[in-house]
Amino acid sequence: MSEHVLGWIAGYHDGELTESRRAEVEAHLGACAECRSELEELRALSGLLETFEERPSSDLPVERSRTSREFGKQVMARLPERQVPRRERWLKWGWKLAPVGLFGVWAFFQAALWLAGGLRLAAGWIPGAAELVQSLAPLEGLMGRLPGGWMRGLLGSIPGLDGGLGWTPPVDVLELGLSAVIGILLLSWWTGEVLRRREVREKHKQ
Amino acid sequence: MVRGRDSKEKMEYSSAPARIDGLSEQELAARAKAGEQEAFGELVCRLRDPVVRVVYRMCADGPLAEEAAQEAFLRAWQHLGRYRPELSFRSWVMGIAVHAAIDALRRERPAINVYEESLSAPPELGDGSAPAGESDGPEGAVLSGERARAVRRAVMGLAPASRAALVLREFGGLSYAEIAEVLNIPLGTVMSRLNAARTQLRRELANLLEGG
């Protein structure tokens, strides 16, 4: 007789074995009373577990359907707002955060410029400040072109605004205007989101 | 005002079957995942009985099983974004339901007496089967009742982790791989927990198993 297959009996009982393993176990069961008895005990246990007390409400399909519908209504009335997975959340929010990123970059360069300006003033009496100012020179050069230079070019192309009026808006005013536009956009998005959430909450309360 | 809302609700529920009744559970799950509440409502109605049945076998308490089943569906809705269609929606919800039942037991009955003779009534389930012992006359009913109570005590005497694996396998019909997935444990652990649960049950129910 082949070796006992006790380790495979539970898998066989639960229908979890591969085709070849199942054939192997079945061949063995035909010849081994001990393994057969093990399988019978597992089957008897499953049958016994079926008697776990239970009381159906009614045999009428209409009654069964009513109970399930009532249950469904109760669940739906308590349904909370769905949790959006991280990836979806990023797709939903990521692009809305773009203005924040832009503002952050602008704030960084602006702070560097202010620092350079301050250091230049103090270059005479703080040791090492002159070197630091020099190291910030490329940044100043970049800021000289952005956004002021770019904006001047743009404004110059608008007839009547540059030269024609004899007045060009100061770069600081332009930067401030740009920041205000970004801020307003951001605020409107957030307000819209808050209102939408409030609306969803009200809907659930109903 | 109230009447208006009631009639609206009635209309929503009566119109639901006409449009989504023919869809499979997986199709409904996909729609629900896309945010369609109506599809989720249909899933709740369809899966209520199997989920309550599994949960009841985890906690042996009718009202608690109903509450845990509701909680399971609410959690399922909240985390629908994490649901992967490779797993059947039914199995996924049953896994959530088992966790909800364990949480409910911890919260509601920290000192549950599993050997208590008369636990609360089981939930109303509509599987169409006759109640235990009903067809065997008064004597048969008493014997069946005693056997059912013994089985219930033995199952409730299992450690929650082993009980969860056993309940999902025996009453939920989940495969080992599905149990591993929903309980977030390795396949080997599923087998060892099932083995532990069955060994303990065979020992405690030896008299009933021998007596047939």
Image: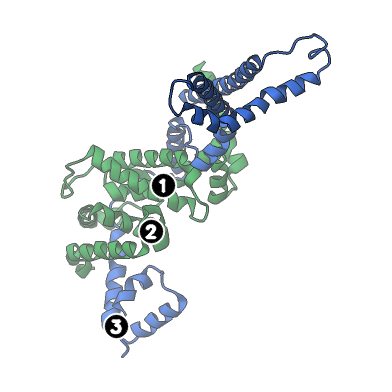
Chain colours: A blue, B green
Q: CA distance from mark 2 to mark 1?
A: 23 Å
Q: Looking at the image, is mark 2 or mark 1 nearer the viewer? A: 2
Callout 1 crowding tier (Cα within 10 Å): few <14, some 14–19, many ≥20: many
Q: Tell me which residue sits at (27%, 77%) in the image.
A: A37
Pointer 3: what residue? A4
Q: Tell me which residue sits at (21%, 63%) in the image.
A: B200
Q: Disc 2 residue type?
A: Ala
Q: Position of residue B188 (x, y in %)?
A: 34, 65
Q: CA distance from mark 3 to mark 1?
A: 40 Å
The reply to whether the C-beta atoms of the residues labelled 2 and 3 are less than 8 Å apart is: no
Q: Looking at the image, is mark 3 or mark 1 nearer the viewer? A: 3
Q: Disc 1 residue type?
A: Asp
Q: Residue furthest front?
A: A124
The reply to whether the C-beta atoms of the residues labelled 2 and 1 are less than 8 Å apart is: no
Q: Nearer the viewer, residue B113 or B4?
A: B113
Per the image, label 3 sits on a secondary structure element best described as loop
Pointer 2: what residue? B180
Pointer 1: what residue? B49
Q: Is residue B8 above or below residue A10?
A: above
Q: Tell me which residue sits at (79%, 19%) in the image.
A: A156
Per the image, label 2 sits on a secondary structure element best described as helix
Q: Nearer the viewer, residue B81 or A51?
A: B81
